[in-house]
Amino acid sequence: MTIQRTAVKLLVAVGLSAALLGGLVPGQASAAPLAGPGVNLEAVATGPAIEKITYIGSSLGTSEVTNDGQGNFVADRYTDARATYLSPEFALTDVPAAATVELRTTWGDSAKRVTLTQNRFGLWEQRGSSDFSRPGERRLSVRFDVLVDRRSIGALTVNFAPAAEQPVGFDPNAVEGQLAAPQNVRVDSGRLTWDAVPGAERYQITALLIDGGRAVDLWKVDSDNLTGTSESVAEIADFLDLPAGDYRFEIKASTLHNGFWNGSVASPYSARTEIVAIG
């Protein structure tokens, strides 16, 4: 067995969350009035529209999004982080097959426009992320206008403010559609094993070095088999070059996005295993 060569040794792990957040569809036909004698009713025309914001960016997930029903979506973010990466994904409706879909990004006195393409989930996204540095040091508003054949069909505005201004009870990473945490994680006969998570396409293993009853270091690695639910502890230790000591393991599950770990719907961590001696 060869474990995927994507191992990363981290001292601090920060999970991303995300999910599909719905909204009213601009341009959707409303209930028509009853027709009286001799009254002709014309069909209400529909056109391209933003149906949902399905992802916003690193450390933001999909966030809490409001929608005025006219295609204007707003997400607030309270943070003192020195940088954040925004790369929104959109679920769009009624886009003609030959249409050009673009994203116009505006912040301060700067603006840019990039072409959006559909990924394998049918969501519209840009290639790569936009970097807006130091949002926590000042108020900053970033606007993303979706253009279909150069006509704006709606926009997402992300407003940043200092972390101290975050309202009580505000959840910056409201999650809908998040995968469930793996259950029944255990080490049995030298193998780390867990129950399959519905919808999972990748599992991530964390090995935590335990000293004095607490984790003092950690390593992460993707499971060798995309949908497998068992790995050899000895092979994990060999691949990660784990020093001798006592370890506990935990598992996360997610789907794959363009072949990579999809943090927006990644599950919470599983419960940790009992201590396992290595070395």
Image: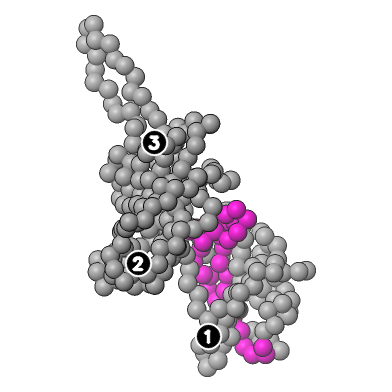
What is the span of residues highlighted in magenta in the rendered image?
243-272
Other residues around mark 3 within 10 Å, as few (<14) / some (14–19) / many (≥20): few
Residue located 61% across and 64% down the image: 203
Can you name the residue that lies furthest to the bottom here? 212
Q: CA distance from mark 3 to mark 2?
A: 29 Å
| Residue nearest the viewer, comparing 157 with 11 | 157
| Residue nearest the viewer, comparing 258 with 212 | 258
Residue located 38% across and 28% down the image: 46
Can you name the residue that lies furthest to the right here? 1
Q: CA distance from mark 2 to mark 1?
A: 32 Å
Query: Does any portion of residue 53 appear in the rendered image?
Result: no
Tell me the residue that label 1 is attached to.
Answer: 215
Residue located 58% across and 70% down the image: 251
Tags 2 and 1 in contact by the CB under 8 Å rule? no
Q: Which mark is residue 135?
A: 2
Q: Quadrant of residue 50?
A: top left
| Residue nearest the viewer, comparing 236 with 127 | 127
The question of residue 64 being in magenta is answered with no
Q: What is the tally of numbered marks visible in this picture?
A: 3
Quadrant in the picture for the C terminus? bottom right
